[in-house]
Image: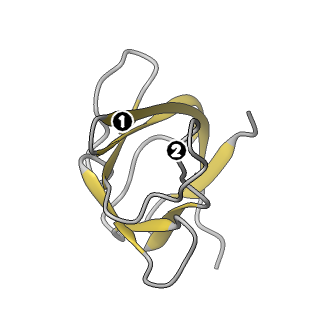
Amino acid sequence: MKRLIIYQDNTQEIKLFGLHDGDTGAFWLTAIVNATLVDQNGTSVPGCTGISLVYQATSNGNYFGVVGADFEPAIGDGYVLIVDGDQGAVHLHLEIPTEVQARKS
């Protein structure tokens, strides 16, 4: 899986595209999806905890959430973005390797 890069002190979106049921192929349109960034010790990172990802109307299973400008973890890699979602009886769990970089002005 490709590494996600997010920036300190910068409002930005977490975007998931094309969420769908692996058995039926139907896109997820009514899921509850949340994301939390954890550090190398598995500790939740302030400013990126319990981020709600919201379905984007008329899309094919696209969900977006916002990380606020108060996000200030240490620069580096070794972070993991944990994404959990549910639609009906189907559960989604992703662990996305993540790197935090300094904001570029």
Classify residue 96 by image quadrant: top right
Gap in Å between the C-alphas at discs 1 and 2? 8 Å
Which residue in the structure is indicated by mark 2? 21
Using the image, determine if residue 101 lies above or below residue 90: below
Q: Nearer the viewer, residue 96 or 46?
A: 96
Circles 1, 2 touching at the beta carbon (< 8 Å): yes
Indicate the amino acid at tag 1. Answer: Val
Q: Residues within 10 Å of mark 1 (few under 14, many from 20)?
A: few
Residue highlighted by disc 1: 90
Q: Residue at x 64, y 79 (%)?
A: 105
Instruction: Tell me the SS state at disc 1.
Output: strand
Instruction: Tell me the residue at 24%/48% (across/down).
Output: 50
User: Which of 74 and 89 lies nearest the eye of the viewer?
Assistant: 89
Q: Residue furthest front?
A: 24
- Closer to the chain start, of discs 1 and 2, is 2
**Judging from the image, what secondary structure is the residue with disc 2 in?**
loop
Q: Is residue 44 left or right of residue 27?
A: left
Determine the residue positioned at 61% across, 59% down: 18
Q: Is residue 62 above or below residue 73?
A: below
Identify residue type, mark 2: Asp
Left or right of 55 in this view: 19:
right
Q: Residue at x 31, y 63 (%)?
A: 30
- Dividing the picture into quarters, in which one does residue 51 lie? bottom left
Quarter of the image with the N terminus is: top right
